[in-house]
Amino acid sequence: MKRCTLFAALFSFSCHLLAATDSADSTASAIVINPSQIASGDSEQLEQQRQYYQQALKALRQGRQKAFRKQLAQLQHYPLKPYLEYASLQPRLHKLPRREVDSFLDRYQGQRIADKLRLQWLRALKNRRRGSDFVHYYKASLADAKLRCYYQYARFRTGNEQQKQDALQQGLKLWNQGKSQPKACDKLFAQLEKQQLIDDKLIWQRYSKALSNRQYKLARYLQKRLKAEPYATWAANASAASKKPHRIGNYAQFADQSPEMLAVIEHNLRRLSREDPQAALKHWRHYRGSHAFKMQAKGHINERIIQGLHKQDQSELADKWLSDTLAETNPTLLEWRIRLALNKAQWTDAQQWLTQLPQEHRNEPRWQYWQARLAQQLNGEDPAPVYAELAQQRSFYGFLANEWLGGSYQMNHMPVSIDETGVEMLETIPAIRRARELYHHGDTLAARREWQYASRNFSEQQWQLSAEMARRWGWSNQAIVSMIQASYWNDIERRFPIDHHSQFAHQSTELDIHKHLLLALARQESALATDAISPVGARGLMQLMPATARQTARKYKIHLANSEQLLEPHKNIELGSRYYRELLDRFNNNRILATAAYNAGPHRVKRWLERSDMQLHFDAWIESIPFKETRNYVQNVLAFSMIYAHLLGSDSRMLDEKEKTALL
């Protein structure tokens, strides 16, 4: 598998991200490439151009400039020629004259590679302290905090009087953030201090933001700077309450009604809710009456207090306060309360709180199912009419209803209508042509970025057609993403591609795991992106953590040279399937528990089983999983497995009788 190519390294691209955003917002026309020059059907000419491209890359890597220029000259109409030129220019930016940069930016105006060069050029100009040039080339959509600060500083240093004053005002906005700013902002901020633009009121505003963001080091620094009253006293009181939240009960010290003080009160009430929710409720009763909090803040404070009371076995008090404040309660808190009742098998309480949900929430399949389920549990009412209606849906709850009815799962497959002329038109878009070539050369991340650049103004129909285009390229992940962007959910063949069929089939046979279940895991974990790396480091199709992969490899004597191998589909599928088999064995072949453990870890699942005391029906156990991510994960994998079973021609059920009757 080609992953991090020389090409990607030259361009400083990260090679293994699941999703990447492109900050460029240029809408100018990209350079037009005549499709007749390299027609999609002229495979021989296209293959030759691809070879020239690879040879040019090799020559550039080896420093053979003459050979590089010769190969470059052969690529007059190849979509990736700009990338080669960029790779040649980028190492020389620290000494490059403006005319070469201008020539590149003019020729490739509207292409993301032009913005890539502009960004590198801005950094070079900053390092060379060329303020006037920096202002000239600056583009706000490309800038991070360092460049934004330098831009305003350069404007202050080189601009006219009006520009200087505007730069200072923009600098104040950069300064007044609830987090520390990079050192690159120090010179700009020094000018703000010199001009005496940072007064105590502004410091107090930033102090309260820092406190709410738990940026305590920054808050302490700002507090020391406050000298004028009442701000110095307010900050001292806020700081004392932050260390000892009970001090929020000194009402006179927090009588101010400014937005900053309201934020301080909210912050400390939420903190106090963790250690002494009864005291937090007492003080909240006071502040609710004396201060004008926004509805959102009221909901957040109520949520923390009510959850804190339940954790300290003050359920009666918590429920009374919830009943008294229903008008300002977020539906998510009511849903949390329903799940808490389900987890404790308190069916009457669950039904009571479910009736308090807004009607639009009660109409969701999840809560329609539970209304019927609870009515059956408590009153013996027949849930079949509700289940029959739900069973028409392609969803976890639709499939779950069919588990009780014993009917067939409804897939409601409605393929998108493919206009071949529309697909051909999309394929002529220069950025799409570049994306296709990048994907061909194995640089999926760069291909994804070009795709995003090209599609930023796509219509729903164009997204549908682009999904088909990606499917034809063999780029399943992009087909899935495109269908999501199109908000078209009923074309299950394009939304659920069957990739790496032979590898999954082999592991299915070898480990006695349904192939559709393994595919569902991979689809949920990575949307079939082989280069996926999560924020915590999970890698590849089945999102394996390196430590878990190493442990699994050692246990089953599977060769794993390094973590990079986890981005190879066959290795990832082998190790991921082995690990899932291990979880199935650990949890008595129960797919619900094994799937939850694959996402949240087996130790958490064991703890959740202890919490439920192995007394819950499977559906209540799933619904009351405390992590929203894991709860949705389990439901998705089970539902996806049935979609894949349908596509593979299998009549398997989502759950077997043992799984449905076991108490968890």
Image (tube, rainbow, N blue to C red):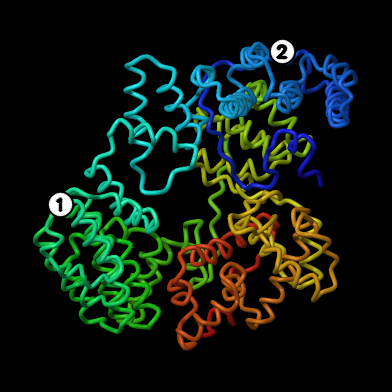
Q: 339 or 281, which is in the foreground?
A: 281
Q: Is residue 384 above or below residue 137?
A: below
Q: 352 or 574, which is in the foreground?
A: 574
Say which label, 1 or 2, has the lower sequence index.
Answer: 2
Q: How many marks?
A: 2
Q: Residue at x 28, y 71 (%)?
A: 244
Disc 1 vs disc 2: which is toward the camera?
A: 1
Question: In this rendering, does residue 419 appear at all?
Answer: no
Question: In this rendering, does residue 267 appear at all?
Answer: yes
Q: Residue at x 47, y 88 (%)?
A: 613
Q: Residue at x 37, y 25 (%)?
A: 167
Percent x, y of residue 483: 56, 41
- Name the residue carrying label 2: 34
Percent x, y of residue 269: 25, 66
Q: Amino acid at mark 2?
A: Asn
The kind of secondary structure element at disc 1 is loop
Q: On the picture, is 205 further left or further right than 102?
A: left
Q: On the picture, is 420 further left or further right than 147?
A: right
State if disc 2 and disc 1 touch (CB < 8 Å). Answer: no
Mark 2 burial class by Cα count in 10 Å: few <14, some 14-19, many 20+: few
The disc placed on residue 230 is 1
Q: 118 or 529, which is in the foreground?
A: 118
Q: 316 or 198, which is in the foreground?
A: 198
Q: Amino acid at mark 1?
A: Pro
Q: On the picture, is 633 further left or further right than 369?
A: right
Percent x, y of residue 135: 49, 20
The kind of secondary structure element at disc 2 is loop
Q: Quadrant of residue 70?
A: top right
Percent x, y of residue 40: 77, 23
Measure how far apart labels 1 and 2 are at the Cα level.
Answer: 69 Å
Q: Quadrant of residue 546?
A: bottom right
Q: Quadrant of residue 655?
A: bottom right
